[in-house]
Image (tube, rainbow, N blue to C red):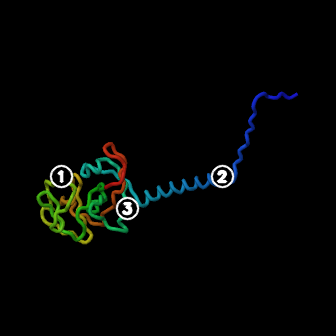
Amino acid sequence: MARRRKGLQFYQKEKKINSELLKDIFELMIGTLVAIFLAFAITYFVGMRTSVIGDSMEPALYNGQEILINRFIYKISSPKRGDVIVFLPNGNQKTHYYVKRVMALPGETVQIKSGKVYIDGELLEEDESYDKIADAGIAENEIVLDDNEYFVLGDNRNSSEDSRSGNIGAVDGSNIIGKAWFRLKCDESEMGPVE
């Protein structure tokens, strides 16, 4: 004789996995794998990762801070004034990457007078946060840039080895690795695009 339970009884409906649910799960997994592959491919083939060496780009970038470099952008366009570029000085493969800001473009004349940058004889309007340049270096005299040369400076003007230095000078476009694209977290700075 079977005993009956007293009280309420609930019947649980068996859950069945239908083909629509399996299809949705499969699409989600494939979409995730494709996104991971694309992120890896873009970073590997278009981008590159390097570290900033020295304090020449402070406060925008700090010593030891890692940045991602967009190696593709200058294959379809040219560097613009204000871009932060990554280059090898004089194409020297045995040195570290330099990170500097483009001040003057090909064909322009640049000179530093009274601690300020002049492009084609006109004072370059800049943010007041930049220090007055104490040493004009080779830019004390006018420098006429060739068709594929750029004049670069560090943001920390008085603690930067840049185009004012005779051993670096104007940067040839063929020595530019790419544009500093994204800064990774550092103790002093947050992650975000390089400006």
> What residue is shown with label 1?
131
Instruction: Check contact, mark 1 vs mark 3: CB within 8 A.
Output: no
The kind of residue on which mark 1 rests is: Asp
Q: Is residue 55 above or below residue 73?
A: above
Mark 2, secondary structure of its residue:
helix
Mark 1, secondary structure of its residue:
loop
Q: Which mark is residue 71?
A: 3
Residue at 67 percent of width and 54 percent of height: 20
> What residue is shown with label 2?
22
Mark 3, secondary structure of its residue:
loop
The kind of residue on which mark 2 rests is: Leu
Residue nearest the viewer, comparing 157 with 119? 119
Which residue ends up furthest to the right in the rendered image? 1
Q: Is residue 3 above or below residue 144?
A: above
Q: Nearer the viewer, mark 3 or mark 2?
A: 2
Q: Is residue 77 visible?
A: yes
Q: CA separation, marks 1 and 3?
A: 30 Å
Picture coordinates of residue 56 (x, y %)? 24, 51
Q: Residues within 10 Å of mark 1 (few under 14, many from 20)?
A: few
Residue 165 occupies which quadrant of the picture?
Answer: bottom left
Which residue ends up furthest to the front in the rendered image? 8
Picture coordinates of residue 105 (x, y %)? 24, 67
Q: CA separation, marks 1 and 2?
A: 62 Å
